[in-house]
């Protein structure tokens, strides 16, 4: 039996167990024809566009999650109507020698689960979502570049990948190039410093200068890399001059990037900058509900009380929130125990913040005030001094310790920390946090201080 047919049949068999008989028969009974395999997609023929829409809207993510578990190869199912398949055949007959102009590796790099269809939208990310959709849908390049910024784990990479998937879904021949800024810098270094005669620099130029869509993640990591910034500027100019789309993500607005060429920052401001903020509780719960659909057969097995507790414990980082949910679900499944609040506490004991009163909405202001009071008493400096611009060693050290605890133990966004510490900018807070992070690795006294402080904070 053809391996693709076997994978499809096994996927349907697993899916059937999770659906009621009428729903399964209505949409999936008789879907046995595989039209083609192309770029790791297996195309299944469906009767009409209504069936196609319903499957892709409500079942596509589930189907591909099942396929991913069943097959070691990264293959995904897509659905094509009979009319679309017939039209595609006619095009091939008319132009039998046509092949993709730019065979893209993007499908192997873009995460298959980061699509627009499974991005949960709320007030904190609605504008970013709409802007990303417009970039994906419009060939006019009205937002170029699209610059998406926000704290860690809020969905920037998800939106960027979704743009890539949407564009490739509509035209597989589009040359989509997805790269992190660290990878771009590494490839440029290897291309310009290679002692081999392997055409490294030509390959580099071919990859980036021929992109139709360039997606660059975490552009802030080009800070201080002046030679790489020069090369990226040339790539940027070349692509935008030819009306090619560029999408960038960063952890801060373009104007707050340090040691970045002014002309690059100016180019980043050409298009539109959109901010993704920390999600409110309603959105966090919606995200958890959505993720449950791919983890267990009946999401209703997990009480709403548990989802709301998780949303309270992880208010600022979607990645951490989803990781906690997966950890809890896996723990209960492995031990064959119910998804209760009590089991959630046991499963996540090591990672749940200890300070949160889940009977009240999380108040970052009160938390920061409490931690600053504990730290100021411990180091015998005033809270006002910690919030001031003083650079005295003892005061700056206490300030950085407090920032570190807020960031790494309680997951408070850098921007929020900066606002409470005298409106310091994002980069200044990050620098202070990094100093303590580095110190804790080798300095037992600093590590011991933080452990003592955390015990005091938990007692308050």
Image: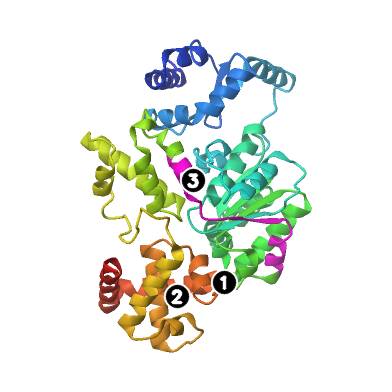
Q: Which mark is residue 282?
A: 3
Mark 1 crowd level (few <14, some 14–19, many ≥20, 10 Å Cα) = few
Q: Which residue carries the number 2 mark?
A: 432
Q: Which mark is residue 402?
A: none
Q: Residue furthest bottom?
A: 392
What is the x, y in percent for residue 277?
A: 55, 56
Contact (Cβ within 8 Å) of mark 1 with mark 2:
no
The foreground one among 218 and 117 is 117
Query: Is 292 on the left or on the right of 225, as rendered?
Result: left
Front disc: 3 or 2:
3
Mark 1 or 2, nearer chain start: 1
The foreground one among 122 and 68 is 122
Residue drawn at the location 37% of the way across and 31% of the way down: 300
Contact (Cβ within 8 Å) of mark 3 with mark 2:
no
Q: CA distance from mark 1 to mark 2?
A: 18 Å
Q: Which mark is residue 224?
A: 1
Query: Is 94 on the left or on the right of 368, as rendered?
Result: right
Query: Is 298 on the left or on the right of 157, as rendered?
Result: left
Q: Secondary structure at mark 1?
A: loop
Q: CA distance from mark 3 to mark 2?
A: 32 Å
Q: CA distance from mark 3 to mark 1?
A: 39 Å
């Amino acid at each position: 039996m053809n391996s693709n047919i076997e994978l499809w049949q096994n996927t349907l068999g697993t899916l059937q167990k999770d659906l009621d008989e009428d729903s399964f028969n209505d949409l999936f009974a008789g879907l046995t024809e595989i039209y083609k395999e192309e770029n790791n997609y297996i195309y299944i023929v469906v009767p009409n566009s209504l069936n196609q829409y319903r499957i892709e809207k409500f079942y596509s993510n589930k189907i591909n999650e099942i396929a991913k578990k069943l097959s070691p190869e990264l293959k995904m199912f897509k659905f094509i109507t009979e009319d679309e398949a017939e039209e595609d055949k006619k095009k091939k007959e008319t132009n039998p020698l046509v092949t993709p102009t730019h065979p893209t590796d993007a499908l192997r790099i873009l995460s298959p689960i980061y699509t627009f269809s499974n991005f949960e939208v709320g007030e904190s990310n609605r504008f970013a979502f709409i802007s990303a959709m417009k970039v994906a849908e419009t060939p006019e390049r009205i937002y170029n570049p699209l610059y998406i910024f926000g704290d860690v784990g809020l969905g920037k990479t998800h939106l960027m990948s979704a743009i890539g998937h949407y564009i490739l879904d509509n035209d597989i021949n589009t040359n989509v190039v997805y790269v992190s800024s660290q990878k771009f810098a590494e490839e440029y270094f290897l291309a310009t410093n290679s002692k081999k005669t392997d055409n490294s620099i030509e390959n580099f130029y071919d990859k980036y200068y021929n992109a139709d869509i360039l997606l660059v993640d975490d552009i802030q990591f080009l800070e201080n890399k002046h030679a790489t910034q020069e090369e990226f500027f040339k790539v940027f100019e070349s692509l935008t001059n030819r009306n090619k789309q560029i999408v960038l993500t960063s952890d801060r607005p373009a104007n707050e990037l340090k040691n970045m060429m002014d002309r690059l920052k100016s180019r980043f401001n050409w298009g539109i900058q959109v901010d993704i903020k920390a999600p409110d509780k309603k959105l966090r719960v919606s995200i958890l509900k959505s993720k449950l659909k791919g983890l267990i057969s009946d999401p209703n097995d997990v009480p709403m009380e548990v989802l709301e507790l998780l949303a309270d414990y992880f208010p600022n980082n979607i990645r951490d929130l989803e990781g906690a949910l997966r950890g809890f679900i896996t723990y209960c499944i492995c031990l064959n125990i119910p998804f209760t609040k009590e089991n959630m506490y046991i499963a996540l004991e090591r990672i749940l913040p200890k300070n949160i009163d889940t009977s009240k909405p999380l108040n970052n202001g009160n938390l920061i005030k409490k931690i600053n009071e504990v730290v100021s008493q411990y180091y015998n400096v005033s809270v006002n001094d910690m919030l001031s611009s003083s650079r005295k060693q003892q005061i700056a050290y206490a300030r950085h310790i407090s920032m570190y605890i807020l960031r790494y133990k309680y997951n408070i966004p850098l921007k929020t920390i900066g606002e409470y510490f005298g409106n310091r900018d994002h980069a200044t807070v990050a620098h202070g946090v990094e100093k303590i992070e580095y110190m804790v690795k080798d300095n037992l006294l600093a590590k011991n201080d933080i452990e003592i402080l955390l015990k005091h904070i938990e007692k308050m």
